[in-house]
Amino acid sequence: MTPTAAPVAPTTPAATDTHCPYCSLQCGMRLAPVGPAGSAPAGPPVEVLERPDFPVNRGALCGKGRTAPALLARGARLTGPLLRDRPGGPLRSASWPEALDRVAAGLARVRDEHGPDAVGVFGGGGLTNEKAYLLGKFARVVLGTANIDYNGRFCMSSAAAAHRRAFGLDRGLPFPLADLPHTGCLVLVGGNPAETMPPAVRYLRELRENGGTLIVVDPRRTRTAELADLHLQPRPGGDLALALGLLHLVIADGLLDQDFIAERTSGFAAARESAMAHWPDRVERITGVPVHQLRMAARMFGEAATGMVLTARGAEQHSKGTDTVGAWINLCLATGKSGRPYSGYGCLTGQGNGQGGREHGQKADQLPGYRSIEDPAARAHVAAVWGVPAASLPGPGVSAYELLDGLGRPGGVKALLLAGSNPAVSAPNAGQITERLRALDLLVVADLVLSETARLADVVLPVTQWAEEDGTTTNLEGRVILRRRALDPPDGVRGELWLLRELAARLGVPDGFPAEAEQAFEELRRASAGGDADYAGISYARIAAEDGVFWPCPAEGHPGTPRLFLDRYATPDGRARFAEVTHRPAAEEPDEDYPLYLTTGRVLAQYQSGAQTRRVAELNAAAPGPYVELHPRLAQRLGVADGEPLAVTSRRGRAVAPARITEAIRPDTVFMPFHWAGAGRANSLTNPALDPVSRMPEFKLCAVRVERVHREAGT
Ligand code: SF4
């Protein structure tokens, strides 16, 4: 599937301008009712129309966005709460009062018996800003627990940590996407927008039409890599050494911007010393990228008048992800490609609200407005907005994987409220995490479908979807946008804001949890005021009138900030900081027993854990199941034919999926997409080794053994 224009929108008052529920591009779309008013169609109740006036995607949508209404159909989703009366028993239908009473009583019991930190909250990067904000408030004010984190930790946390370390502030892109076509050289590291966000590929094509060059760094020759002027194909885990090697060559070739380094940065001496220890031959040995390609890339980037580096999960989901991103930022800073128009480092965030979801309080160490939960002034500000003593707010909790791995263990979380996430498929070492979810005294899942995680729950609460509710998200550019309610949800379905209000009231906090999204946003504005991610000047009316507003926007008269760091960085001295980084191996490298690299990723027609997209017939037809991508030479060595089932085994588990033989992958590496549960679950294999700064697990690299299934079975 390629980006397609939906049918052209008629001008009808019944149509609603909104945004796609899936990825961080948050494409604008228009929804129009299907059938006459008041009718109840058997299929999706709305259809997607083109919305060419929204600047990010200009009407183009990928197949995921175009088919998103399929899940609004009655038969495709949950329409009433479900309860389990005894462990191992079946889920049965329940009324909302019964379900909410059960949840409140269970949370209160665990809190009273084991203390507030025995109750946990796990959120998602797809939740709106309002939901993320009130989920964080619910955890800290109602439950009093430190243990809240979210699946965005598995997504952009390494880039966020490196961003803050270098620039003092983390926003995915410090410039609008519209700047991309005007840069001289764009390096895309570990990202595949041609499959993950196809409408964004237009910016890459325009860049090349304008005479700019595109370098793609990826162990696989992806559809995006095929668009590039130069494709560097390092071993998984080689991105850090590669960036250091390019900086080495930039220094050797005299392509530094000495004035920029002197005037706007600090810490270059240490970065230089580390880069000089990564000479070309050494980097070729580490990464597998030939020296002549390294030289070519260094010259293309170093000699361009302007340049950008964008990283995505391929570079970030490593136990050295923060340092890897830091090394690429170093390359930008050393060449003066930051803090000026059409230059800079950015991260392509993944989930629909991956950016906003981490700004407003569902991350273990943060309060709304991107404030540190350990900062006394931040605690005082937020506590005042919430009307509670600052001392009553808990401190930082543990990160997502640590939270999940501790479920049901002594000292760990015993009752978990989970919203907008499916860790039974998406967490690393997913077999182990599934066991931990089963070990809970109480698992409550709020979701729109019966995901693999919801199937394990004691209580399942069916919640509204994107088109059935108002709410804001913040796209990968830092643009706060507004999703509008286009239709009513089915009778048995409720919004998460309502749900939090009801639970808070049952747990003794009757006020402070508005069920209306705009009311919640108004409070979020006040809570974020003065913070890094300052939304104080943003209102629903402004977002609608201005095609979104870029944060920081500290006052209603403020225009918002599409471009960051043009005058100064957000560090105390206003200078960007070089990272002191050096190459190190992955937590697990191939060896005799597990001789191959496994890397994981996404495909065009599925999204994240697949809980939604696997229920859409058109998407399933395009991408029906998992597979193991391997090079013909490896296939020959194993004696494997295309389509034959392969067993992939790591130290954590085993997955079985058909072989897909392609020259697009390195012979020392196999690839599996991670959207599926069951025997082909890629995350049965992945390594939860954590980055020491961001606590990001090493999804992108582990050591595996690959065998033919029938040979392994001895038949
Ligand atoms: Fe746009 Fe992403 Fe939705 Fe596709 S999934 S339509 S790229 S927002």
Image: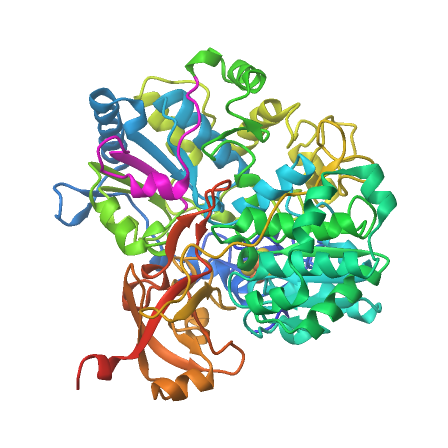
Q: Quadrant of residue 595?
A: bottom left
The quarter in which the N terminus is drawn is bottom right
In x, y percent, where is residue 538? 68, 32
The answer to whether residue 313 of the structure is visible from this angle is yes
Is 251 left, or right, of 45 in this rendering?
A: right
Say if 659 sits above or below 210 in the image. below
Q: Main secondary structure of the magenta part?
A: loop
User: How many numbered markers are drawn?
Assistant: 0
Q: Residue at x 70, y 67 (%)?
A: 215
Is 407 part of what is drawn in magenta?
yes
Question: Which residues lie in the magenta part?
Answer: 393-420
Q: Residue at x 66, y 72 (%)?
A: 231
Say if 590 sits above or below 639 in the image. above
User: Quarter for ligand 1?
Assistant: bottom right
Q: Residue at x 42, y 81 (%)?
A: 660
Specify how the rendered protein is coloured: rainbow
Q: Residue at x 57, y 20 (%)?
A: 378
Q: Quadrant of residue 372?
A: top right
Q: Quadrant of residue 401?
A: top left
In x, y percent, where is residue 385? 54, 17
Is 39 part of what is drawn in magenta?
no
Say if 6 sits above or below 374 in the image. below
Is 496 left, or right, of 339 in this rendering?
A: left
Say if 340 sits above or below 610 in the image. above
The answer to whether residue 53 of the structure is visible from this angle is no
Q: Nearer the viewer, residue 672 or 89?
A: 672
In x, y percent, where is residue 160? 58, 42
Is 636 left, or right, of 3 in this rendering?
A: left
The quarter in which the C terminus is drawn is bottom left
Is 631 left, or right, of 571 in this rendering?
A: left
In x, y percent, where is residue 185? 78, 62
Q: Nearer the viewer, residue 646 or 25?
A: 646
